[in-house]
Amino acid sequence: MSKKSFTQKEYVLSISFANYLKGISGMAKVLMEHQKMFNNKNVGYVNLFVVKKYLFQEKITAFCYYGLVINGEYSGIYSIEQIINLIKSWDDQGKNLIDIHLHHLLYVKLKQIDKLLSHIRAVPIKLYLHDYYTVCWNYTLLKNGESYCGPQKMCPSKCNDCRFYDRSKPRVDQIQDLLVKYKKRILVVSPSEATKNIWLESYPEFRGQTIVIKHQKEIGKYRENLKPLSSCKKISIAFLGMPAEHKGWKQWEMMVENYKEDYRFVVFNSSDEEYQNMEKVKIQYSPGNLSAMTKSLRDNDIQVALLWAKWPETYSYTFYESLSANLYIITNRVSGNITNQVEGRRCGIILEDVNELYQLLGDKEVLRERINDFRIKCDGGAYYLKENDEIVEYSLKKMNRNTMVSGCINLKLHDFVATKLLNILYHLGKIPG
């Protein structure tokens, strides 16, 4: 079989800004899960990821092409016109495109996505909310990269004094135009109520077309790691994920420096880095090992997770993984779905600021009492987290068998030359994607 083909009669087309086979982000994990779930239902999974080059601090796009992944196998780099023609050839073979999933619009040329969607008519579109990029270029909604600016829609009175505003305004206007143009075909998929409510502040016209589908299902109960801590046991606190500012890494480092003698601090992520005054546990996700974080938390005698996101997390895999290891969660008021879940499940504490965090850590016995009280009352987190196949069932149920695909005749000679060169450079690891 050709590397650019697949055996299934139905398939899904997804679009993201990076190759999920190489990714370490939550979005990459979602795409891995989606590929697995759709393939298990005998539905093909085709992904386009952006291969691009920007100039002058990302003000000018030198080129924008698309890497192609089919059922988890990398298949090369192509122009959007070549992709359209490929989809047309699949249509001629009787293959039915049942869904288009817009996972992220970062880096993509919106005119190219418009061209793709206009050539593929009558196919439902799912817009996924992995973050808030469709609301602001700074997808974490941190004003000047520092603090959460609130859920209100972008406007001069709110955003004039933010360094992201001049870049965000034209980009968001273009995104809004694209979404409005295809509004009748779009269903917005949010991983949490918190994210849905924030996003609808900017897109109220989609209120009737926005649903919540969590990334995972919680199966069974995990009853371990619930014994009360003795007074002589040093409390172990974990940071989950890469050391990013918006994840609270700066606050974590300061906390470790101040309390390194009082607590055991452990970092769980996929890097090879080691960190001063902290233990390190390396995590490696793969399509067959999506529960790596949960297992590592259970195996390494951890009692507390600091999930100090400075922005409203849309889902937070790390929250559910921590909960599945029966960890006590420390978070703050602006952490989005983490805040909502901790409040609703009473599985931790929500603090207002870093001063309250230091006050909590300053008295080990008070923290120990809180952990033990949680453990006594807790009936156990999920025994395991299973990928949520609700989107697969939804797509198959709403499947449109009247897909219309038109080919793209305006192929450019330089695109054939460029894609051949890019394929070589990508194979050599000289360009990102």
Image (cartoon, rainbow, N blue to C red):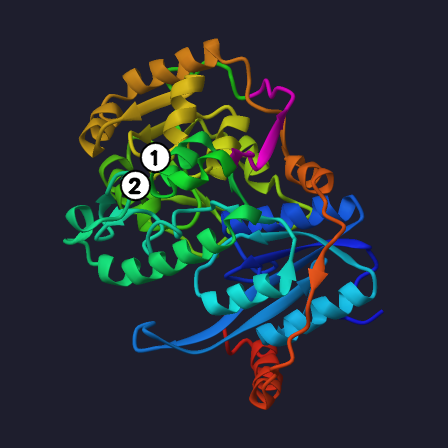
For the residues bearing labels 1 and 2, Cβ distance under 8 angstroms = yes
Name the one closer to the observer, 393 or 323: 393
Relative side of 381 to 312, left or right: right
Q: Is residue 203 above or below residue 261?
A: below
Q: Which residues are magenta?
A: 210-224
Q: Which residue is mark 2?
A: 310
Name the one closer to the observer, 117 or 144: 117
Dividing the picture into quadrants, the one containing residue 426 is bottom right
Q: Which residue is mark 1?
A: 335
221 is within the stretch colored magenta: yes
In percent of the image, x 65 and y 53: which residue is there? 122
User: Which three-letter amino acid code belongs to the residue tagged 2?
Assistant: Lys
Q: How many marks?
A: 2
The residue carrying pointer 2 sits among few (fewer than 14), some (14 to 19) or many (20 or more) residues within 10 Å by Cα, namely many
344 is within the stretch colored magenta: no
User: Which three-letter amino acid code belongs to the residue tagged 1?
Assistant: Ser
Q: Position of residue 337 (x, y in %)?
A: 41, 32
Q: Could one spot residue 185 in this view of the protein?
A: yes
